[in-house]
Image (spheres, rainbow, N blue to C red):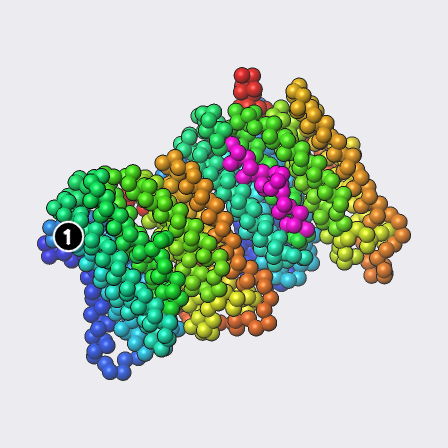
């Protein structure tokens, strides 16, 4: 039993350990150097990642409260990995912050929350995990302590999260009221087209919609992304969104598996709205973070297309796409974070003539954007194509056509950045930046991921094998 | 021979460019790599001949197949027939010529050659693939290099043109994607031969044929989606225009033939009147629009619209001769237009203008370039002895085989365009080459350098060989065309 608790919850244990180490470091020494704290965090995250890859059996604990299997472990590893990359990329920001340790403590608690949320075997556990992963996030958004915008963003974040959590809870209570159980395994058989249950489904989907910023629940996204420190923005758009999407796929399949028509239609509408609105708003953004915020909204639209296909290939494509999305979005955010930390510039126009001074960084950014746009050989091509193909599995070629048109629109605004970097002239471009070793390493990992996860098909095939 | 070498060699070439320093190193590596690719392509041709004369009548030769995304039934599947081989040879020739005429690209030379080679990877991959997914992968692979080539090294309103090109081609890819999904969900496979064997229902064919055909058609200047062609070609750097017109537009024609017509034969017949009408409009409109142009690059770009119209016309006519003609026209137009753009580039480098009215009497200072200019002009106009004549003649003869009145009418209209072509070609040639010298100070002007001469000879050799001995290429292409016709003909009889 003891051994089981240890091995099945290995990622969670590792994250707890990391939390405690950081906490004691903070308490233990009054004048802890940021450099030390940052490096220790890297090591701890690396440790958590390594622990995550230790092979372990599938199983469940605490009377089905906590479930784990290879797929969930892979998803957790992806999240830990993304967090590590973000931590590495924010090196220049965290090193000079007055509360670095607290920042990482908050970050690791949200990660722990996501981890529990993913492994949840019933709705209560799921809700606990979700809350643990969102409340500290609002505090993280506020971490540019001297900036008013940051506080405003945090306020928006906490209010919208609280609201969406309320919706989720309402949905959960209705589900419990109509079925008498909160365990996923028992819910699966007893949820049907009962009106109350349909209402519960709508509430749950709206709650999820807020977390993944699907249109029309996206209004908080752009402001929060803009106000938050870059590290938090990238964390929000990659890690926290990814975790909720993983859960969305499994909840839809587990709890609402009996009512495929219901969520097919809902997802169809949501995905079209999300793609179209995300893309159209991204067209005119000037601030890079807002731009990436809307582009990430559009990406979620594509993911919803994949989920709506309701096939094994589709589910595998969602997980694969999020993996690709981690690489490509973090590649873009890595450059933005570097530029923002060293020069304070965050507008797309500031990137004019970027190629004259920073060749490597420009290519990293360009590759990441191509991957987001779905251009081969970048992995995003495969990710997006599989999502769209999966979406057409139900014979809905209209959805596929809309999605394909949206790909053209998205290419337009991604090319806008590419054009600014490569083609536009600028008398006063961003000076040549000296990235720290760890930042360069993080970017190199992202580039490698973008270049190879697609062409080299093993990643997808492995994920697919976990679903079959 | 494993066809994947045709991908690996240019990829290695591109990688080898990365550590290179300075223009001299970069261009030598690029030239060596593209020459190696040309040799490889010639060896492929030789081996292919050998197989065919030995009696190997398989539809596709040198097939190979590796698992890629098995969950989706996607394989890296390659194979060639005569049609693909002629395309591969064309690409290899144009790449070498393109590298040669870019000998003096000083700004960001490494990036320039890298993108050129990457673009060629897309083309080679497209032509050797017999799996729809891989074809689509390579088709899109070639889009971004074009965008960057035009946007960074172009001239005029280059950002606008680059954007227009990338978005329109992406739009084409999006349509192809829908067609691809339709084909996949109706047959369960991406393999070309597999799809042809399984076949699709008539309704599905009629639904998805327009997606695939228009999608690929955008790449090859299908009216009314041709508008990227003039802007893209005229803004691109010389080698960029050569690649665009010589290679990239052929991806579309090849796709229309190999994917749309071959896989959905019934729909090809059903939509054939629409296709030939659009093609005829492109041919006529293109040639009349050319008459109005004053810029040499625009002249060639619009005449490309017109010439590529013949490709679509041939495919739309769905007779064996017409389709063979379409293939020959692709090769011929690829060589000719690449040479034309190369010549325009040479002229521009010396006169610093591309406006016809400001030039004159070039024959007196640059006899070599002027001669090439005349030859390529005559080829474009369809003079016997050059490839253009052979190709257009085959298309016309094949078209006439359709006894239907409307088809004949379209054929006549298309044929009439030759007169217009003669007008603009002769007028431009006369103004630029003949007459009094009109470039101001002619003392600094020197004739073609060795690299330019080599490029011109390479492309011209192709044009003349096809023109004088057309049976080489028709023998090469015909078995492939017959294969396609076998798929299409049973439908025609019905």
Please determine whether, in this image, residue B430 is positioned above or below residue A126.
above
When asked about the image quadrant of residue B91, the answer is: top right
The residue at 22%/48% (across/down) is A200
A177 magenta-colored:
no
Q: Is residue A414 above or below residue B135?
A: below
Q: Is residue B279 above or below residue A68?
A: above
Callout 1 secondary element = loop
Name the residue tied to disc 1: A65
Residues in magenta, as a range: B209-234
Quarter of the picture holding the C terminus of chain B: top right
Q: Main secondary structure of the magenta part?
A: helix
As drawn, is A467 to the left or to the right of A340? left
Quadrant hosting residue A153: bottom left
- Which residue is drawn at the image coordinates 50% and 40% (left, top)? B175
Specify the farthest residue to the front: A195
The percent coordinates of residue A461 (x first, y second) are 35, 44
Q: Nearer the viewer, residue B109 or B190?
A: B190
At a point 47% along the width and 61% down the height, the residue shown is A285
Question: x and y percent of residue A197 in the render?
Answer: 20, 44
């Amino acid at each position: 039993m003891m051994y089981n608790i240890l091995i099945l919850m290995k990622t969670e244990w590792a994250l707890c350990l990391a939390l405690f180490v950081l906490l004691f470091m903070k308490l233990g020494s009054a004048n802890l150097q940021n450099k030390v704290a940052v490096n220790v965090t890297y090591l701890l995250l690396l440790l958590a990642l390594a622990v995550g890859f230790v092979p372990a059996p599938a199983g469940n604990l605490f009377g089905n409260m906590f479930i784990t299997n290879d797929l969930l472990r892979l998803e957790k590893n992806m999240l830990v990995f993304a967090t590590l990359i973000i931590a590495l990329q924010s090196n220049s920001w965290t090193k000079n912050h007055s509360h670095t340790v607290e920042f990482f403590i908050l970050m690791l608690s949200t990660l722990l929350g996501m981890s529990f949320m993913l492994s949840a075997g019933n709705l209560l556990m799921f809700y606990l995990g979700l809350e643990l992963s969102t409340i500290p996030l609002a505090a993280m958004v506020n971490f540019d302590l001297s900036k008013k915008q940051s506080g405003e963003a945090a306020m928006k974040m906490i209010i919208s999260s609280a609201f969406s959590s309320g919706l989720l809870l309402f949905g959960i209570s209705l589900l419990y009221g109509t079925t008498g159980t909160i365990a996923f395994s028992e819910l699966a058989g007893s949820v049907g087209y009962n009106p109350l249950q349909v209402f519960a489904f709508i509430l749950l989907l709206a709650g999820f919609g807020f977390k993944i910023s699907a249109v029309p629940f996206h209004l908080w996204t752009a402001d929060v992304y803009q106000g938050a420190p870059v590290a938090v923005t990238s964390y929000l758009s990659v890690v926290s969104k990814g975790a909720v999407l993983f859960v969305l796929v499994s909840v839809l399949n587990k709890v609402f598996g009996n009512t495929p028509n219901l969520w097919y239609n809902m997802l169809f509408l949501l995905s079209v709205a999300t793609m179209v609105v995300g893309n159209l708003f991204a067209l005119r953004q000037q601030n890079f973070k807002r731009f990436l915020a809307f582009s990430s909204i559009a990406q979620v639209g594509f993911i919803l297309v994949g989920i709506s296909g309701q096939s094994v290939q589709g589910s595998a494509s969602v997980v694969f796409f999020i993996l690709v999305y981690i690489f490509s979005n973090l590649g873009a955010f890595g450059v933005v974070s570097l530029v923002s930390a060293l020069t304070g510039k965050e507008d797309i126009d500031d990137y004019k003539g970027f190629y004259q001074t920073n060749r490597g960084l420009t290519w990293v950014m360009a590759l990441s954007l191509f991957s987001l746009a779905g251009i081969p050989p970048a992995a995003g091509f495969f990710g997006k194509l599989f999502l769209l193909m999966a979406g057409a599995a139900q014979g809905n070629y209209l959805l596929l056509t809309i999605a394909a048109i949206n790909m053209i629109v998205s290419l337009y605004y991604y090319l806008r950045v590419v054009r600014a970097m490569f083609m536009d002239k600028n008398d006063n471009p961003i000076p040549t930046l000296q990235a720290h070793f760890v930042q360069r390493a993080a970017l190199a990992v992202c580039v490698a991921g973008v270049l190879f996860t697609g062409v080299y098909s093993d990643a997808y095939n492995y994920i697919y094998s976990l679903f079959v | 021979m494993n066809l994947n070498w045709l991908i690996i060699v240019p990829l290695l070439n591109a990688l080898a460019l990365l550590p290179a320093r300075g223009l001299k190193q970069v261009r030598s590596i690029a030239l060596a790599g593209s020459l190696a690719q040309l040799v490889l392509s010639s060896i492929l041709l030789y081996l292919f001949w050998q197989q065919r004369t030995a009696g190997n009548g398989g539809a596709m030769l040198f097939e190979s197949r590796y698992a890629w995304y098995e969950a989706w039934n996607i394989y890296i599947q390659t194979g060639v027939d005569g049609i693909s081989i002629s395309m591969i040879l064309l690409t290899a020739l144009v790449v070498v010529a393109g590298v040669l005429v870019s000998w003096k690209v000083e700004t960001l030379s490494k990036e320039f050659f890298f993108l050129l080679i990457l673009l060629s990877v897309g083309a080679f991959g497209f032509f050797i693939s017999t799996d729809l997914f891989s074809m689509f992968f390579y088709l899109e692979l070639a889009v971004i290099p074009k965008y960057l080539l035009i946007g960074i090294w172009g001239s005029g309103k280059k950002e606008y043109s680059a954007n227009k090109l990338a978005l329109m081609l992406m739009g084409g890819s999006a349509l192809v994607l829908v067609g691809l999904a339709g084909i996949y969900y109706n047959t369960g496979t991406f393999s070309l031969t597999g799809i042809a064997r399984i076949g699709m229902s008539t309704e599905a064919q009629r639904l998805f044929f327009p997606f695939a055909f228009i999608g690929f058609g955008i790449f090859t200047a299908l009216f009314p989606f041709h508008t990227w062609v003039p802007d893209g070609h005229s803004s691109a750097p010389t080698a960029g225009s050569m690649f665009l017109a010589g290679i990239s537009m052929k991806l579309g024609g090849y796709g229309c033939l190999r994917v749309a017509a071959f896989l959905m034969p019934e729909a090809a017949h059903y939509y054939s009147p629409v296709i030939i009408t659009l093609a005829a409009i492109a041919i006529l409109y293109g040639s009349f629009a050319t008459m109005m142009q004053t810029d040499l690059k625009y002249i060639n770009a619009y005449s490309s619209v017109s010439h590529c119209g013949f490709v679509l016309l041939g495919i739309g006519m769905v007779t064996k001769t017409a389709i063979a003609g379409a293939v020959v026209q692709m090769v011929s137009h690829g060589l000719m237009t690449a040479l034309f753009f190369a010549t325009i580039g040479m002229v521009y480098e010396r006169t610093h203008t591309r406006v016809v009215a400001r030039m004159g009497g070039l024959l007196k200072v640059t006899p070599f370039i002027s001669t090439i200019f005349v030859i390529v002009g005559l080829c474009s106009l369809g003079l016997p002895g050059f490839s253009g004549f052979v190709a257009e003649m085959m298309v016309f003869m094949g078209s006439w085989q359709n006894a239907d009145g409307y088809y004949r009418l379209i054929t006549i209209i298309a044929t009439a365009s030759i007169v217009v072509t003669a007008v603009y070609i002769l007028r431009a040639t006369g103004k630029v080459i003949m007459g009094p010298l009109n470039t101001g100070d002619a003392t600094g002007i020197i004739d073609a350098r060795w690299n330019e001469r080599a490029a011109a000879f390479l492309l011209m050799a192709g044009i003349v060989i096809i023109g004088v001995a057309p049976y080489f290429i028709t023998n090469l292409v015909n078995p492939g065309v017959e294969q396609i016709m076998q798929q299409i003909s049973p439908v025609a009889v019905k």
